[in-house]
Image: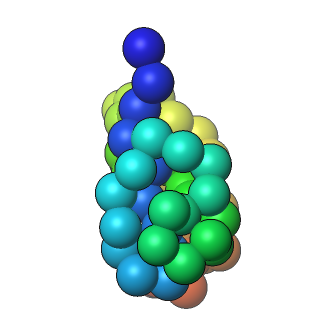
Amino acid sequence: MRLLRRCERDWTYTLRDKCPKCGGETVSAHPPRFSPEDRMVKYRLLARGKKC
């Protein structure tokens, strides 16, 4: 089973590694899994630029 991917340039959804419209790289369109016991959430929020 393959997951949807999204182009960061034009927000086109595809199953490919490259966007069919612009040829740009695609990233996973799904958020990471959530876990209440996650000890690294503080560092991810700091890396994203949000206050914790």
Quadrant where the C terminus sits is bottom left
- Using the rendered image of the protein, determine whether residue 51 is visible from the camera's viewpoint: yes
- Determine whether, in the image, residue 15 is placed left or right of residue 18: left
- Using the rendered image of the protein, determine whether residue 42 is visible from the camera's viewpoint: no
Residue in the image at 40% along x and 50% along y = 14
In terms of image quadrants, where is residue 30? top left
Residue in the image at 54% along x and 45% along y = 16
Quadrant where the N terminus sits is top left
Image: 18 above or below 49? above
Front residue of 39 and 15:
15
Residue in the image at 62% along x and 71% along y = 23
Image: 17 above or below 23? above
Percent position of residue 27, x then y: 55, 56
Residue ranking furthest to the top: 1
Image: 30 above or below 1? below
- Determine whether, in the image, residue 32 is placed left or right of residue 19: left
